[in-house]
Image: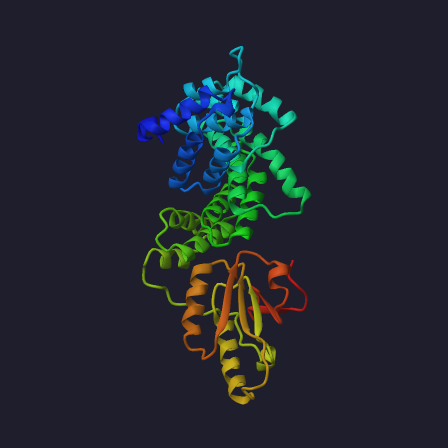
Amino acid sequence: MSNGSVPSDLQNALKDLGSNADQLEQVDPELFERVARWRRACGDAEGAATWQTWSLMPPEREELKRNLSQLWLNLDEPALAAQILGNKSGRQDDSWEQLTLLLKQAKLLEATALQKKLLSNPPELSIQTLLALVVAWKQAEQPQQALDLLQPMLLRIQQRNEIPTAPVCNTVAKLLDDLKRFDEGEQWWLRSHRSQPQQTWPLMRLARHALRKQQFPVVVHYSTEVLNREPDHSFAPDLQSKGLIGMGASKSLALMRGESPPQPNPDPHFHCPEPELWDQCRQLALVGFSEANLVEHWFQALAEETSATNPSAPQLPLKLWLIASPDPLWLRHQVEALRSRLNQTIEIEQWPSWDSQRHGSAQLIVEFAAESPGWRQQLSQPC
């Protein structure tokens, strides 16, 4: 917001308050009320309440100076903020507002020294001012200073066993990435995703981290998740393509490019399992498959079991995990086609690797095998 967009009577009120900060008992309460009306019109209910209260009970001199200087800084008037912050000797006291002023003036060495001093015995710092300072350090291309500023808040969150919000996680993660501390950044992106799973930004950053480490199945997983949330996402298809190329997933690439889906290749080693394999199985994990042969047989067994089962008998919900597929989009395409024939609701999840916490509840785990019969039952969880 520029000074020119602020009414002249408001500018005069702010200036009068600054000029009379040492003689608050003589200040016209209307000046405080004028600022309160402005903050209310700007949607700042908390600020409006503060200024309205001061019209009845004036604040301490230093508190008023801090708030006035912050308002002038928000109005992009650092010179007026500097006048407010200066003491009788002309020297400006150490404060977060003074740090904001130094950053506005691009005095980075002075700002760095002042922040270090403030953090050694930090005065009260509002979230609004904290975030504004973090943004200012980022704009000055000083991610380490922004990260240092966040450390006390992060320590408090940890000591209270609280979960950081997604915006906090995103801010820390991006700063760590800017500092090329990629492994630490990745952990904060994961925290953000767990905190608010519908976000796409953390998923994209996780995909890029995986690409950097050439973990191509993970690249495909995260970029696919982005496209599930935002089908028209501008950058996810490129990452997905790079992941599929890295995997050598030719059929998935053909599907992604809109080419005619290839027909499944008959596997000479594949032999149909005995019906007993599917007995009472309602939650299945398939590990390492490109083709959906086993899914088709399981769905057939489910259909036969449903027709012979008392529909009122309690049943586990149907669930299928497709894990570590070498051709993930192609496998999912086949499974979705088969699902349309299944007259039951089934939850399907696809993951790049086995995770005992996510997949450990599977009643049956079947892993791909290159030799006949083309699969093997896992009696214990895969590594």
Q: Position of residue 176 (x, y in %)?
A: 54, 35
User: In the picture, residue 335 is in which quadrant?
Assistant: bottom left
Query: Is residue 97 placed above or below 255 in the rendered structure?
Result: above
Residue at 52%, 47% in the rendered image: 166
User: On the rendered image, what quadrant is the C terminus found in?
Assistant: bottom right
Q: Which residue is nearer to you in this view: 333 or 177?
A: 177
User: In the picture, residue 11 is in which quadrant?
Assistant: top left
Query: Is residue 367 placed above or below 102 in the rendered structure?
Result: below
Residue at 61%, 28% in the rendered image: 123
Residue 16 in view of the camera: yes
Residue 106 in view of the camera: no
Q: Position of residue 158 (x, y in %)?
A: 66, 43
Q: Position of residue 76 (x, y in %)?
A: 39, 26
Q: Position of residue 361 (x, y in %)?
A: 63, 67
Q: Which residue is nearer to you in this view: 210 or 250?
A: 210
Q: Which residue is nearer to you in this view: 233 or 18?
A: 18
Query: Is residue 358 placed above or below 54 in the rendered structure?
Result: below
